[in-house]
């Protein structure tokens, strides 16, 4: 797994967790995994072809036995045959304005358009070769919700009132 929030319900933690402006790629496990936890916001992340281990099937974004989870403005690019966003025995999961690339939907609901090509500069699992910034004309640009969106992307570039989906502005 790239990012895990795990078992915070055991200690009755009342705060919240913010996961934003991350790029997760080529992990054996999930991109962002929330397990037995509450009050997590995963916003403006790029998840690219994780779940490389054949036994892990959950999804790039997962909420398992959790509550009050928000997945928003994430680019979720799954390996073919793997799920995009998955929840199991969770309540209060909001999944909206996530752009999905892949062939296996999980029915989480919300406004999560399926797109064939997000038009990134050079998506790649090789860290020395990848460039996850959207090209001009990408459907990701200006498609995000401003709600809870970070004011800057992971490089420090300012986001507009209609942010780009994913971790990087163009």
Image (spheres, grey):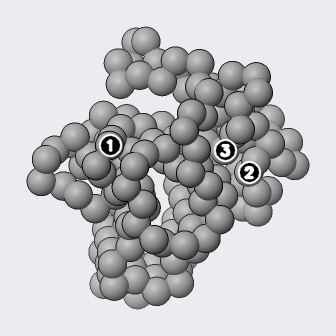
Residue 79 position, x and y percent, is: 33, 41
User: In front here: 138 or 92?
Assistant: 138
Q: Which residue is mark 1?
A: 80
Residue on which the image places disc 2? 144
Which of the two discs, 3 and 2, labels the residue nearer the N terminus? 2
The answer to whether mark 2 and mark 1 are in CB contact below 8 A is no
User: In which quadrant of the rendered view does residue 153 lie?
Assistant: top right
Toward the top, the furthest residue is 129
Query: As drawn, which residue projects farthest toward the right?
Result: 161
Contact? badges 3 and 2 (CB < 8 Å): yes
Residue 123 in view:
yes
Determine whether, in the image, residue 99 is placed left or right of residue 59: right
Residue 18 coordinates in the image, percent (x, y):
56, 60
Label 2: element kind: loop
Q: In the displayed structure, would residue 123 be above or below residue 35?
A: above
Going 22% across and 40% down the picture, which residue do you hit?
A: 52
Mark 3 vs mark 1, foreground winner is 1
Please say if 154 is above or below 15: above
Look at the numbered disc 1 and give the secondary structure of its residue.
loop
The residue drawn where x is 46% and y is 18% is 130
Seen in the picture, residue 80 relative to 112 is either above or below; the reply is above
How far apart marks 2 and 1 lie (CA) works out to: 24 Å
Mark 3: give few (<14), some (14-19) or many (20+) Cα within 10 Å.
many
Residue corresponding to mark 3: 165
Q: Locate residue 141: give its quadrant.
A: top right
Question: Which residue shows up at 65% across the image and 65% down it?
Answer: 111
Mark 2: give few (<14), some (14-19) or many (20+) Cα within 10 Å: many
């Amino acid at each position: 797994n790239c990012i895990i929030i795990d078992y915070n319900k055991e200690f009755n933690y009342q705060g919240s967790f913010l996961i934003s402006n991350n790029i997760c790629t080529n992990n054996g496990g999930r991109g962002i995994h929330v397990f037995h936890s509450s009050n997590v916001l995963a916003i403006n992340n790029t998840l690219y072809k994780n779940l490389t281990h054949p036994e892990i099937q959950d999804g790039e974004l997962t909420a398992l036995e959790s509550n009050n989870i928000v997945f928003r403005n994430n680019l979720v690019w799954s390996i073919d045959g793997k799920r995009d966003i998955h929840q199991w025995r969770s309540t209060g999961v909001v999944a909206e304005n996530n752009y999905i690339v892949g062939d296996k939907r999980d029915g989480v609901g919300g406004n999560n358009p399926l797109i064939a090509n997000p038009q990134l500069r050079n998506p790649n699992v090789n860290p020395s070769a990848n460039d996850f910034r959207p090209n001009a004309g990408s459907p990701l640009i200006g498609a995000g919700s401003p709600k809870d969106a970070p004011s800057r992307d992971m490089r420090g570039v300012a986001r507009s009132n209609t942010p780009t989906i994913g971790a990087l502005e163009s």
